[in-house]
Amino acid sequence: MRNTKPLGLAAMAAAAALTLTACGGGEEQAGGGETGGSGESVRIGIKYDQPGLGFRDGDEYTGFDVDVATYVANELGYSEDQIEWVESPSANRENMLANDQVDMIFATYSITDERDQTVDFAGPYFVAGQDLLVRAEDNSIQGPADLEGKNLCSVTGSTSAQRVKEDQPGANLVEQPGYADCLTALESGQVDAVTTDDIILAGLAATDANQGKFKVVGNTFSEERYGVGLPQGSDQCEAVNEAITKMIDEGAWEEAVTANTEGADYSFNEELNPPEMEPCGE
């Protein structure tokens, strides 16, 4: 794990806004955004409904994805008030990039070979793994091997649910429309665990309403590389990678993970994180 030197995100953002100059050529796009830092705004896609990652509450946007996106935007020459946040549901992300609705996407967007055919990726800025969330006092489930005969909740149609069906046939899969429904079922004892990516589980457990009720088991059984989605042919990949690397080296990356999972009894996988950037264009 890298040696880091923590530095407050707000202070870093302010310093970046004052001292950084624009990167790229500033080619104008629809919607007021530009591909370089000389534009009036940059449109960044995030989730609006994932506490701890991308969450909207009125005019406030919070979460790890938001913190990383804000840092990167600052490094590209955009101040915080030049960021236009755009809701980017999972099913719409490729089309939003292709149709020039956003300039980049930070939304738990896993890098896959299939998506690489239509989207360029920078990063990854986090490597998640499927994990389990259980009630805080429950020590009977330490990993997927303990799911035999247990009631396990995930979201209908998710890759997490599909993986459980294939790899853990002894678990009784209970599918719900959203993870908030799964947490309600977990708290009431209707299910024994909830499964999805570890940092998503940590974000859910870290909300004020849920602190102290649940814990992340910490035994991941997959790898999901969260990348920054860019329009195909974008010239911003290298600059974004440099910004993420700087965030990691200066300690702000780890500070952001900690701040957004506080109260969830969660530690990121140090064998996978902080991540190394993958070469652009490969």
Image: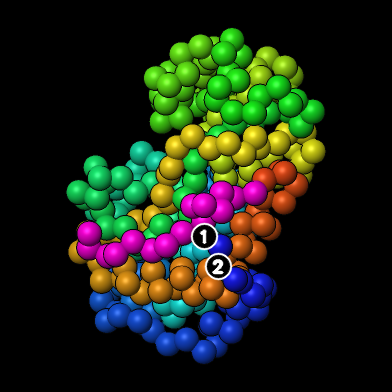
Relative height, residue 202 to residue 3 (above, below): above
Number of marks in picture: 2
The kind of secondary structure element at disc 1 is loop
Q: Nearer the viewer, residue 253 or 73?
A: 253
The kind of secondary structure element at disc 2 is loop
Q: Evaluate whether residue 104 shows in this view.
A: no
Q: Which of the numbered marks, if any, corresponds to residue 232? A: none
| 235 relative position to 139: left or right | left
Q: Quadrant of the N terminus?
A: bottom right
Q: Position of residue 258 (x, y in %)?
A: 67, 57
Give, as a three-letter code, the residue at label 1. Answer: Pro
Magenta: main secondary structure equals loop
Q: Which residue is mark 2?
A: 2
Q: Position of residue 90 (x, y in %)?
A: 40, 41
Q: Which residue is mark 1?
A: 274
Q: Which residues are magenta?
A: 267-282
Relative height, residue 7 to residue 277 (above, below): below
Look at 70% across and 36% down and name the residue there: 215
Give, as a three-letter code, the residue at label 2. Answer: Arg
Q: Quadrant of residue 200?
A: top right
Q: Nearer the viewer, residue 147 or 123?
A: 147
Q: Nearer the viewer, residue 100 or 269?
A: 269
Q: Quadrant of residue 179?
A: top right
Q: Position of residue 185 (x, y in %)?
A: 67, 20
